[in-house]
Image: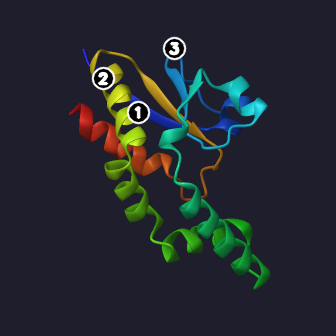
Amino acid sequence: MTGSVDETYVAALQHDLVEPGDAALVGVVRRPTGWFRAETDENQPALGPPEALLDETKDRTEELKRRGMCDEGAHNAAWEETDFTRRYREYLDADPAARDALSDLAGRVAAGEDVWLVCFEGEGKRCHRHPLAERLRERVA
């Protein structure tokens, strides 16, 4: 029996907004904080977006905020302007550590484990965990 793949953000776990049950809570961030680690079972930093893409998107977000956009709007606009989804997917395909981490998770799900991908971004912001969950589901199917 194949397991399931879901995703959430760490604040939803902290405030009991989601119920992951017995699923493995797998962080997918480059720079986990102590409080992030406390909410997850493990972290796979190789599945976090590459630093250069994170920095470029963050810089663009800050520029848009200085121009008067709200945080969420600036984040989402910067995501589109940096072509984040395409570039992140290319990273998942090209980086050996990301490929290995994705293969490991796919194997676990194929073996029946339920996995929830966890990062920082709330529901209103575009987030890498969405294309990552899609890619993971594709690998298991």
Q: Nearer the viewer, mark 1 or mark 2?
A: 1
Q: Dot 3 surroundings within 10 Å: few (below 14), some, or many (20 or more)?
A: few
Q: Which residue is mark 2?
A: 107
Task: Give x and y (percent) for residue 112.
Answer: 32, 15
Residue 16 visible in the snapshot: no
Of badges 2 and 3, the one in the foreground is 2
**Quarter of image, res 90:** bottom left
Question: Where 110 sits versus 131, above or below?
Answer: above
In this rendered view, identify the residue nearer to me: 13 or 104.
104
Q: Name the amino acid type tagged 2.
A: Gly
Viewer-proximal residue among 116 and 15: 116
Q: Secondary structure at mark 1?
A: helix
The circle drawn on residue 22 is: 3
Which quarter of the image is occupied by the N terminus?
top left
Q: Is residue 67 left or right of residue 73?
A: right
Sequence order check, earlier mark of 1 and 2: 1
- Foreground residue among 114 and 57: 57
Q: Which residue is mark 1?
A: 101
Q: Are marks 2 and 3 in contact (CB under 8 Å)?
A: no
In the displayed structure, 81 sits above or below 53; it is below
User: Image quadrant of residue 34?
Assistant: top right
Q: Residue furthest front?
A: 96
Residues at marks 1 and 2, CA–CA distance in whole angstroms? 10 Å
Q: Is residue 24 visible?
A: yes
Give the residue at x 68% y 37%. 32
**Residue drawn at (75%, 85%), measured in percent from left and top?**
67
The residue tagged with tag 2: helix, strand or loop? Answer: helix
Q: Earlier in the sequence, mark 2 or mark 3?
A: 3
